[in-house]
Image (cartoon, rainbow, N blue to C red):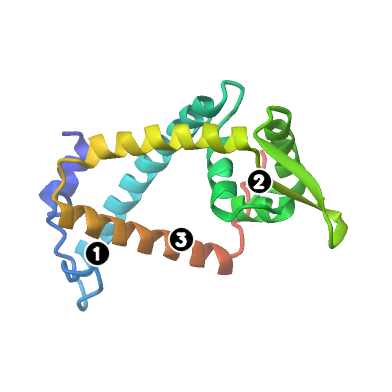
Amino acid sequence: MDTDRASASSAGLVAGEWRLGVDERNGEGAGPVDGGAAEEAFRAVEREVALMFRRGRARAAEMSRLVHPKLEGVAYSMLGHLEEVGQVRVTDVGAYFGVGKATISRQIKTLEELGLVTRESDPLDGRVSLVSLTEEGAARYRRAYDLRLEVFREMLGGWDPDDLARFAVLLARFNETVAAVAERAPAPEPCPED
């Protein structure tokens, strides 16, 4: 066990030991918590989320290359978004991923050149480009998605179904909170150059 996990475990913060004012049946707040215990919980969550994000970035790049060997990091997620929403404005894809018009146009162009997406003018406004998956793009994405889902089944197959369901609910709640905070918070100022 690494030192972060060991310290979190000794504070009663991992492996089902969260007793920090959270109703274990539904993950909702159950009342005030001890300030020190809450601070330890915040630190433990930050460590685990940082680890999950680091691993997630590496996995995203791997998943993108499963779709096509010339793809990089965010491409898999972008294809997944297009599969979910269908035909959409290029600028809306950029907004969804929090990137500017130039960045998203470059990424869409790469996907288009590889035959994974198609771009066309919006019939209602010719200045607007619409993008959607091609049949090839959808098939390649689906293959990679199915492989990823199988990995999740292998990783989490030994979990109790109730724990897995609770994890899904809490993870969705966490993602909703992150999205809400991101919408209302200004972007942090970058560090000044020396």
Q: Position of residue 26 (x, y in %)?
A: 22, 69
Check contact, mark 3 vs mark 1: CB within 8 A.
no
Does any portion of residue 104 appear in the rendered image?
A: yes
> Tag 1's secondary structure?
helix
Q: Which mark is residue 178?
A: 3
Q: Amino acid at mark 3?
A: Val
Is 177 situated above or below 144? below
| Residue at image mark 1 | 38
The residue closer to the viewer here, 72 or 147, is 147
Q: Position of residue 3 (x, y in %)?
A: 20, 37
Q: Amino acid at mark 1?
A: Ala
Q: Position of residue 2 (x, y in %)?
A: 20, 34
> Tag 3's secondary structure?
helix
Q: Position of residue 160 (x, y in %)?
A: 13, 50
Q: Which mark is residue 123?
A: none
| Residue at image mark 2 | 192
Check contact, mark 1 vs mark 2: CB within 8 A.
no
**Mark earlier in primary sequence (1, 2):** 1
Is 167 situated above or below 68? below
